């Protein structure tokens, strides 16, 4: 056995030291050089390496202005060290977009429900609900009482059963004349 002695089982293991990162992020940050220089001077004053007057002269500001900048720096430090909520933050823009998507989804759902209701009413042969009376002075356009689709379905059913549309309305073999034929006969007499 050559080289390194093996650690005994009773001897505690040494922890490996991690490399200290230091303040490399501060150097790599794209902050303005003036702000970085001011932050360094405030930290030197707080550490006791400089006096506030020396730092104010180095910054080129008056002592009251220095104290104001120092206070803002400390407040920024405190704000940065507050515990943060986990996960993505709630932004008003994101909330607004989420609510807009929800409104669109609900509008589509409502339109689908209305369509299904109309289809069910047509299938059962119910008429559409009563409409409001027109406002005075406004003419309401005349609408057909039956929907075009219902008229087409009725015509197809009658052709399928062998009954023609004219026969059902009075132009059949029973000797009675239809409304249109009766008008023709009256006008020729």
Image (cartoon, rainbow, N blue to C red):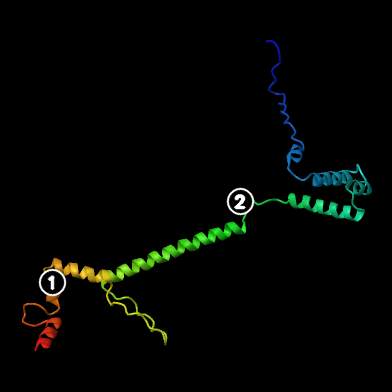
- Tell me the crowding category of disc 2: few under 14, some 14 to 19, or many 20 or more residues within 10 angstroms, Cα based: few
Tell me the residue at 31%/67% (across/down). 119
Residue 36 visible from this viewpoint: yes
Residues under labels 2 and 1: Cα distance? 69 Å
**In the picture, which quadrant includes the C terminus?**
bottom left
Image: 187 above or below 22: below
Q: Nearer the viewer, residue 82 or 27?
A: 27
Horizontal relation, residue 178 to residue 75: left or right: left
Where disc 2 sits, the SS reads loop
**Upstream in sequence: badge 2 or badge 1:** 2
Q: Nearer the viewer, residue 83 or 58?
A: 58
Tell me the residue at 12%/80% (across/down). 170
Residue 118 marker: none
Horizontal relation, residue 25 to residue 89: left or right: right
Give x and y (percent) for residue 125: 26, 73
Q: Nearer the viewer, residue 114 or 171?
A: 171
Image: 110 above or below 173: above
Q: Which residue is mark 1?
A: 164
Q: Which residue is mark 2?
A: 88
Image: 150 above or below 58: below
């Amino acid at each position: 056995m050559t080289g390194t002695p093996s650690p005994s089982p009773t001897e505690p293991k040494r922890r490996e030291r991690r490399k200290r990162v230091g303040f490399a992020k501060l150097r790599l940050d794209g902050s303005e050089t003036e702000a970085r220089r001011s932050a360094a001077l405030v930290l030197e004053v707080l550490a006791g390496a400089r006096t506030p007057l020396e730092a104010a002269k180095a910054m080129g500001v008056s002592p009251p202005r220095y104290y104001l900048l120092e206070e803002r720096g400390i407040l920024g430090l405190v704000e940065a060290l507050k515990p943060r909520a986990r996960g993505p933050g709630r932004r008003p823009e994101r909330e607004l977009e989420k609510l807009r998507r929800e409104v669109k989804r609900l509008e589509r759902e409502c339109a689908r429900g209305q369509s299904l209701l109309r289809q069910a009413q047509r299938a059962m042969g119910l008429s559409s609900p009563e409409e409001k009376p027109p406002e005075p002075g406004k003419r309401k356009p005349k609408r057909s009482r039956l929907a075009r689709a219902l008229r087409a379905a009725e015509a197809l059913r009658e052709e399928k059963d062998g009954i023609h549309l004219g026969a059902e309305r009075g132009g059949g073999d029973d000797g009675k004349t239809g409304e249109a034929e009766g008008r023709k006969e009256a006008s020729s007499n």
